[in-house]
Amino acid sequence: MINPALAFGRRFAERASGLADERMSASLRRRLDEAAPFAAVDLGEGVRGIKPSPESCELFRARRLPVIAQGLASGLARATAAAAREPCTLHHGDADVALLLEQTCFGRRIREDADGFVVDLTHHENLPMLPGFFSHGIKAHLARSNGRFEVARIDIAGHTIARGHPGWPLAKIHLIVGMDNETLFADHSVVHLHNSYLEAAARRTLPAHNPVALFLQPHFGVAIPLNEWIFERFHKHASVGSPFAHPVASILKLVRKGLQADHAAGLATRPVDTAYARAQAHAREVMRAHVEAFVNDNVREGAPEFDQIRAFADAARELIPYVPAGRELTPALLARVLTRFLHEATFASSGDHVVNREVVGFYRSAFRLRRPFTPDARWRPQDLFGSIDTFQRVVFRDVFSGDVCFSRLADVEYDPRLRLDLDGLRRGLAALEQRHPRLFPRDRIAASIDI
Ligand SMILES: [Fe+2]
């Protein structure tokens, strides 16, 4: 029986936030329920999710949900206090924006086009939003100074706003919020999905004794059921930890764009040079050395197991088109694929969570605005948010931002049949922690595909 006080509180919260939950369509729910474990299911807008196995759901319920529940309980207490202290805190000074572009995953979105270096969020224009919230198609033009990127001007709502304009602070707030949504849905979610795709391909094609299965197994955690759980949360706008203003279809549009961009770039991505990109390149080298040590000592192209690995590549290629076809696979290409995914799972995802929490808060945790941009508006920051927005974003930042790393390198142990030890990787990680203490804080790297 539902506690009447809880039901009342929930109705109040929904009304206070102006948000009503979306119902996951019955047909999608049925397709998810009826799919075989590790099958790909279209979630909408062409984005495919992976159906978890009963065992992985059980593992998620037993090991991950209690951690989330515990975090939520302590996070709610912290958030209540913090939200009172920071009713509308948003660091949007020029130096803050420069820091975001240079030191965090925001930098992944810097592109060079005919206009020079830009952050292009023009596809956010006309993106359907929940009632009462706004987003704009924004293009930020960047200038490089002393090796750092600064925002020189911002195209927004048909206007070009430059430093000194009265609307400059508000234009930057809209830019930060747009970037928050872009990096979360078009970048971070792609890492989540691709790791699910790779795990599904491995589970469907590789016998347990195959060396690639033995190598990947310790890195598989609960990414697949976690992703399904997150997707269900996206339908529940009024829940305490949901600070988003996009309906699910809009979230999926951003995810699809991120997937398309990633697929177009392929295995050889070339990020624009920032401190964040340089640190991630060092991290990728550490993972490459580890993967190559595994491949060199355990994978032979002529061995029968390599035919299974070719089938694995074909299955992965159904979901990630730049994975080489099985017939073209070589040990060197296999190493590139495994490096890419282990690096992203280990460093890109945990980097997003940890750094953005400890340095700037999880993506600044501002995902929605209650006022549109107009160049002559005199909105103060507190006019842009409701108190429920602050509360929800603080809960989100504090609870879902990697405060508790589920898997550490300590959890990773390889089957003795593999001729591979972890010492080299451990040394590599220790060196990274020393070299980039801000991006890779000590003992905070989750060297696992469980993100
Ligand atoms: Fe994540």
Image (spheres, helix red, strand yellow):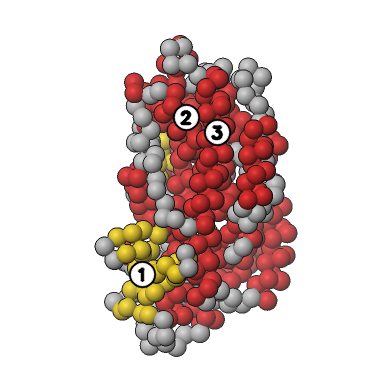
Residue at the image point whose x is 45% and y is 69% from the top: 145
Marked residue nearer the N-terminal end (3 or 2): 3
Circle 1 SS class: strand
SS of the residue under disc 3: helix
**Real-space CA distance between mark 1 and mark 3, rounded to the nearest whole angstrom:** 37 Å
Residue 179 or residue 141, whichever sits in front: 141
- The residue positioned 48% from the left and 45% from the top of the image is 191
Name the kind of residue labelled 3 in the image: Ala
* Residue at the spot of label 3: 289
Q: Nearer the viewer, residue 110 or 413?
A: 110
Identify the mark nearer the N-term, 1 or 2.
Answer: 1
Beta carbon of the mark 3 residue lies under 8 A of ligand 1? no
Q: Secondary structure at mark 2?
A: helix
In the rendered view, tell whether residue 393 sits above or below residue 421.
Answer: below
Label disc, if present, on residue 141 of the rendered structure: 1
Say which residue appears at 55% left-offset and 44% top-offset. 283
Residue type for callout 2: Ala
**Residue 56: percent from the left, percent from the top?**
59, 34
Front of the two marks 1 and 3: 3
| Quarter-of-image position of residue 364 | bottom right
Residue carrying label 2: 335
Q: What is the distance, in whole Å, between disc 1 and disc 2 at their CAs? A: 37 Å
| Dot label at residue 129 | none
Judge: label 2 CB < 8 Å from ligand 1.
no
3D distance between C-alphas at marks 3 and 2: 10 Å
